[in-house]
Image (cartoon, rainbow, N blue to C red):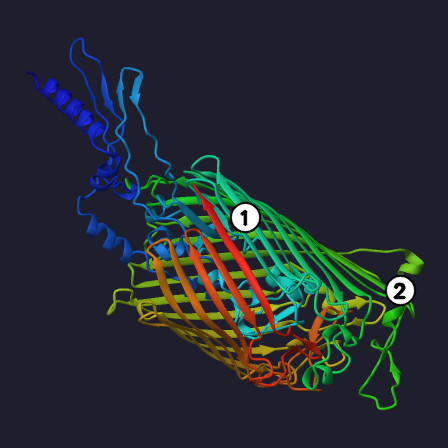
Amino acid sequence: MSSTNKIKNSLFALGISLLLIPSSVEARIFPVFIHDTVDMQQDVRSDGSDSVQIDTVDIQSNNVAVNEADSVRHSVSNDTVNAAAGVSNDTVIHQNIADSADLTPFDSDEPEADSLVIKRGNKKEEKEKPDTLATYFFEDTLRYNKIIVWKINRYLNSPTIVSPDTLQSENMTELPFYKADAGVTYLGVTGSASLLHDFFKREQSDIFPFMDPYGLYAHTPDNVKFYNAKGPFSNLSYYTSGNKRIAEDNVKVLFTRNVTPSLNFGLSYQKMGALGIYQNQRAKAKTFNIFGSYVGKQYVAHAGYIFNGVNNKENGGIVNDFFIEDTTINSEAIDVKLKSALNVVESNIYFLTHSYGVPLNLFNRDSLATGEGTIVYFGHTFEYARYSRVYSDGVADTAYMDLYDSQGKYQNYYKNNYLFPFQSYDSTFASKLDNRLFIRLQPYSSAAIISKIDGGLGYRFDNYYGFTPDAYLYGARDRNFSTGYVFGNAQGVFSKYFSWQAFLKYHFSGYKVNDLYFDATARLSLYPLEGGIHLNGRFLLDNREQPYFIQNYYSNHFKWNNDFNKTTETRIEASVNVPDLNLEVGFKNSLVSNHVYFDDEALPRQTSDILNITSLYVNSKLKWWILRLDSRIIFQNSSNGNVLPLPTITGNVTFYEESEWVKNVLNSRIGFDVYYNTNFYNYAYNPAVGMFHTQSEKKIGNYPWIDIFASFKWKRANIYVKYTNAGIGIIGGQNYFSALHYPRNNRMLRMGVNWYFHN
């Protein structure tokens, strides 16, 4: 027998053997990962015989245990550095979501093996095409995951891998501000204006500051999650508390599906709000998002539409705190300061970020399939956003009974009425059109000490409308501003031990000329423990122009025309993260010059003092037997509490027992949550301005907010029951205020279910 016939017969016998192996056994004998494949193509011929071609044979080491251990070593998360940087670092090894049973509500099966594709002539006898991603965009360890979730850096079109929010602990806290921080100032109900206690987590809009108090409920192109799933993925959740008359509800719907392994579309909708237990307290915050992504061999795109809307009644707070602190009067009988005021804030955002990769073929290893070698990426980003706000009040809001006055004297809630004495209708609008081009160069490898060099050029056009008195003479006029900017980025890694990134943005013309933003991060990883000890550092310099409406505003109750200087912030951060101990300890310090704030009269002011803000924090998760203790503790200090008030201590401690009743089917968590902050002159809130402002009337805090809960995870569903504010009247008295004259809810039973569907 000739050598060619021997080869032919051997290959045919191998194919028949593979067909007879059960799929479950085959998946264990031949586990396949893209980064270990070897492509073999042969055309073996003999006289008069059919052509036998093996398109692809994927080969991997039989030592599965070695590969699994290697996967763990290379899945060390760099979330701390990425979160600190504010821009994603796609050179850092991210966490392999599918390999963690805690991160998915469904089973994490091993990847299915590719079948051999055997052809005789042009006829296919069998072809099993795997649903895998042929792209450089994700690391090899992620491409076989059942679901990948990420956020996008729109300056670089690079991903930051995130959790799909299927953790039982993620769904224990349904309020977005408590997910973001251990403490918050808000108006007592879900959907109302809010301000985080942690200064370093507060975000400010550079175009429409009236949206800032509702940013935690809103979607933006920077926090939209994109999905790549092997099958349809859905999430339905519903939370409710209180009776029908005062109900507080949260509804969330998510659906996403891949049309092809590379193309995904999805939509999400969420409504959070409450009718409120006090007069004129109804709050309603909605967000709707349509998104899509294409992750191909050379072309990568992310696009979407976002609607955010807030429609809140404003009561200005209760007239007298006495009715909360010293009586048990029905909440509906407590008088409030505004009877018919309303705030409506909305945004509509359209965005697109896409890039195209071209290998330069300078080396044999240059390949977009693996993202290795010398590669150039060309990209473009587009965003159009429109924001609006309408504040209105009526005759019933022109005066209220001030019960602090022993004579029962009527006083106006607002000191000024510049336009109409009995009614207000203040409207403001803003829009921006932002386009930028960028180029990314990978000099040699995605795992090199200089792995990415980026640069780009952008142009932004802003449009503003707000009433001014000259509109009576000349009609309503818009204000238009434009600005040009450049930006650059560089980053790299050294094995698993070191990574770094630096980002720079500079405005060279227009309204924001000489604005400068520089953000640099670094991470050093040592491995005395399996998960490592990670040392993270960050330096930030931000020199920024004030938003237009901070400089210029005219309404019925407030007006100003300012010429504030740029605000400059210099920040340093350092932290130690030990994953094996579930422990993170960090330090942050910021020097802020020309800080802008709203004073006791709810007017914007700029201080000449240089503010020094220092923060120490500890995040930990302790385990012993079936007992768990999760904690977030923050120590903060502000050098000028009159301008920037901060609580000295803010903490959240969760103590619970965790039991598994039926293995991989049913487990439970039963325990309690405690939220606490020390006394300080917490903020007041002004509905007409829509902003939190300083006050020197009363200190707020030193009240432990206690929730008792029971949570059950049954297959893909998370179900919980919670009894909120359980310590009222027992611990801390009844001083459960959040903002000045804004009490939180009293005791209430809250229930919810969060269900995931995935094929």
Q: Quadrant of residue 611?
A: bottom right
Mark 2 and mark 1: span between their CA atoms?
Answer: 46 Å
Residue identifier under label 1: 254
The kind of residue on which mark 2 rests is Pro
Q: Position of residue 610 (x, y in %)?
A: 60, 82
Q: Nearer the viewer, residue 416 or 103?
A: 103
Q: Position of residue 212 (x, y in %)?
A: 65, 65
The residue drawn where x is 66% and y is 58% is 285
Q: Which mark sits nearer the N-terminus, 2 or 1?
A: 1
Q: Position of residue 131 (x, y in %)?
A: 38, 36
Q: Nearer the viewer, mark 2 or mark 1?
A: 1
Residue identifier under label 2: 469
Label 1: few (<14), some (14–19) or many (≥20) C-alpha neighbours in 10 Å: some
User: In the rendered view of the protein, which quadrant contains the N terminus?
Assistant: top left
Count the labels in the image.
2
Q: Residue furthest top?
A: 48
The answer to whether residue 219 is visible is no
Disc 1 secondary structure class: strand
